Amino acid sequence: MYVKLSIPERLKDLRVERHLTLEELAEATGLSKSALGSYEADDYKDISPFSIVTLAEFYGVSTDYLLGVSEMKNHPDTDLAGLHLSDDMMKLLASGKINNRLLCEIATHQDFQRLMVDTEICVDRIAAMRVHDMNVVLAEAQKIVMEKHNSGENDLYMRTLELAQIDEDEYFSRIVHGDLDKIIADIREAHKKDSTTADEVNPSDTVRQELEAAMSYEGSPQERQVRVFCRQLGIDYDKLSKEDFASLIRILKKSSLLKIQPNKRGKNKPKKK
């Protein structure tokens, strides 16, 4: 995902958020459809001040946001003191070392409050102390049962008391990890179609296509087998020297899975006139 949205991306995102077509936006703002389309295009050149002001008023955002000067849509005059951010946090946000846009998406996700609550519970250790107390009770009960009934470690009731005890660190880490996993999965899905997101490719399909291309090569059996071998290892066959080719043949001859026929012409051997 982009660290900072361009003007075309901001305009398109705002329109898509309102579920508007270019025709509907043109009718609502009085701007032409062609102009609005050009503003959202990758090769966008310029946008008039009148259009910026018109679109900012229509969407209810600041002109600074549309122009990429600010990342705040609706709160350009917010008092920083009211945000209760530490100096270290302000320094980090201004450093450019992290993706502030991604951080904002994480913090505004519907499950972020649950993540913060669970993290706070984990940090303050109040719940962990209750778990610890419960573990102590179970451990004592296990000890009493063992002393009174001389039960073995694989006894059903003894094992039940043992498994009922919880590793507090592991438990709370799993809870917090689950909260974060859900948030990241949702954001990842939301950016699935971004131009900077890698396309989904089935590795087996790619490998199959490469091997089929190698096997269909019109050459000697040796060259075909070497091509397949190179494809699997990501080696460019066409850049192999005759010495490299000969070395690979010697190696492949040691394989019990391949039947290497005697070399009758060699790699790129010129035909006799």
Image (cartoon, helix red, strand yellow):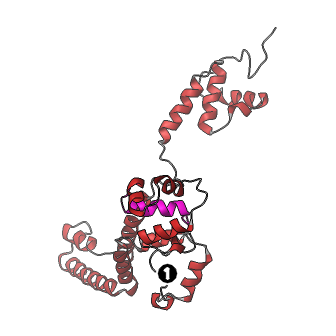
- Magenta stretch: residue 254 in it? no
* Closer to the camera in the image, 189 or 270: 189
Q: Is residue 65 above or below residue 91?
A: above
Residue visible at 42% across and 58% down in the picture: 26
Task: State the image coordinates of residue 118 (x, y, percent, origin top left).
Answer: 35, 78
Residue 16 lies in what quarter of the image?
bottom left
Residue sticking out furthest to the right: 273
Q: Residue furthest top?
A: 273
Residue 251, percent from left and from top: 68, 31
155 to 141, vertically: above or below: above
Residue at point 62% right, 23% down?
224
Which residue is painted at 45% across and 54% down in the image?
192
Which portion, as a residue range, is magenta?
Answer: 1-21
Secondary structure, mark 1, is loop
Magenta region includes residue 14: yes
Residue at 58% x, 56% y is 44
Q: Which residue is mark 1?
A: 76
Mark 1 residue type: Pro
- Quick check: 154 above or below 245? below
Q: Badge 1: how crowded within 10 Å, few (<14), some, or many (20+)?
A: some
Q: Nearer the viewer, residue 250 or 136?
A: 250
Residue 182 is situated, as x and y percent measured from the top left of the image, at 37, 65
Quarter of the image for residue 226 reads: top right
Residue 260 left/right relative to 40: right
Q: At which x and y percent is residue 207?
A: 53, 36
* Residue in front for this viewpoint, 10 or 121: 10
